[in-house]
Image (cartoon, rainbow, N blue to C red):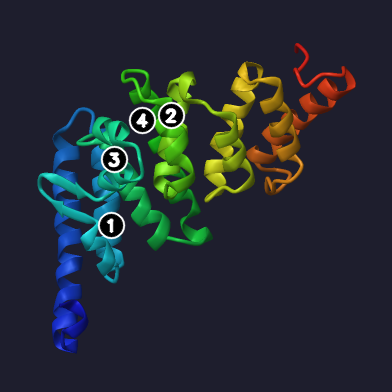
């Protein structure tokens, strides 16, 4: 076992991890060079390789992500099934979405801090865009998505918001309120705000009232942020609706 290894064995193991990262980067680079459209899966491959190369101290992730020339062996899909969403897991299995989400999980944990904020945001946005496109081609179970979100890890929560952007059937006001008031990441909150603004008129009056109330309790960052800007627009709609004696937002 790793815990029982000698210091010399540990050093060799860390070097082996770095070599795995280098090999992964070489494989990804080779495929990208010869591919007309490298695709998001290769982007995830590059990210995983880079993390393993520059930070060979992420031993626990070797149990979650086994990188080789054929792709990833993912724990994430199994966790989704175990958390009460087997059909969602089946649809995601062997797709680039699961690979990007697993890659983001590594980035989110190992590349923390402001220095890597842009990298984390780019991976999240890529995940949301790909999930949105995928949801327009596949039918997910809204009940599974609703049940899964509160239990999900950061990458899965972002993935689920992306699915909602592609399929309005999956949008659920209480889920969005949770993402607004208790987000795991600021980017998750941003995508939840976009979904809330876009789907506001489709919510029930009770859901709109709850969402408007939640806006006053959440922190949306600096006044110059996009999150703050969207939140202010929603608050303005709430004030106008209150003045009109209804939670229904007035026409623009």
**Picture quadrant where residue 195 is located:** top right
Closest to the observer, 243 or 37: 243
Q: CA–CA distance between discs 4 and 3?
A: 11 Å
Decide which of tag 4 and tag 2 comes sooner along the chain: 4
Q: Earlier in the sequence, mark 2 or mark 1?
A: 1
The foreground one among 85 and 240 is 85
Residue at the farthest left position: 69
- The dot on residue 130 is 4
| Mark closest to the chain's N terminus, 4 or 1 | 1
Residue 75 percent across, percent down from the top left: 25, 51
Q: Is residue 176 placed above or below 184 in the rendered structure?
A: above
Distance in Å between CA atoms under marks 3 and 2:
20 Å
Q: Are marks 1 and 3 in contact (CB under 8 Å)?
A: no
Q: What is the CA distance from the residue labelled 4 to the residue labelled 2? A: 21 Å
Dot 1 corresponds to which residue?
A: 50
| Relative to 140, residue 18 above or below | below
For the point 70% across and 35% down, the residue is 231
- Give the foreground label among 4 and 2: 2
Q: How many marks?
A: 4
Q: Image check: 72 left or right of 224? A: left
Residue behind mark 3: 98
Residue that carries the numbered disc 2 in the rendered image: 143
Say what secondary structure mark 3 lies in. Answer: helix
Helix, strand or loop for disc 2: helix
The N terminus lies in quadrant: bottom left
State the separation of the CA atoms marked 2 and 1.
37 Å
157 vs 17, left or right, is right
Mark 3 and mark 2 lie on one chain; the one further toward the N terminus is 3
Image x and y of residue 35, in percent: 17, 32
**Residue positioned 22% across, 62% down in the render:** 62
Is residue 36 at least partly visible in the picture? yes
Identify the mark at residue 94; answer none if there is no mark: none
């Amino acid at each position: 076992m790793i815990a029982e290894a000698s210091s010399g064995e540990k050093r060799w193991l860390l070097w082996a991890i770095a070599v795995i990262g280098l090999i992964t980067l070489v494989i990804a680079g080779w495929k990208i060079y010869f591919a007309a459209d490298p695709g998001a899966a290769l982007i995830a491959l590059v990210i995983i390789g880079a993390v393993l190369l520059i930070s060979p101290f992420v031993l626990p992730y070797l149990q979650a992500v086994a990188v080789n020339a054929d792709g990833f062996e993912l724990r994430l899909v199994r966790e989704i099934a175990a958390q009460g969403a087997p059909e969602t897991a089946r649809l995601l299995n062997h797709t680039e979405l699961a690979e990007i989400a697993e890659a983001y999980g590594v980035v989110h944990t190992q590349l923390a801090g402001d220095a890597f904020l842009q990298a984390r945001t780019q991976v999240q946005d890529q995940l949301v865009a790909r999930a949105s496109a995928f949801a327009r081609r596949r039918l997910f179970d809204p009940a599974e998505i609703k049940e899964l979100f509160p239990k999900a890890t950061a990458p899965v929560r972002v993935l689920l918001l992306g699915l909602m952007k592609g399929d309005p059937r999956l949008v659920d006001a209480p889920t969005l309120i949770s993402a607004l008031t208790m987000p795991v990441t600021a980017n998750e909150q941003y995508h939840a705000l976009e979904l809330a603004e876009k789907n506001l008129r489709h919510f029930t009056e009770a859901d709109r009232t709850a969402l408007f109330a939640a806006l006053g309790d959440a922190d949306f960052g600096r006044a110059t942020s996009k999150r703050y800007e969207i939140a202010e627009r929603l608050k303005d709609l709430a004030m106008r609706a209150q003045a009109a004696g209804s939670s229904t937002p007035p026409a623009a």
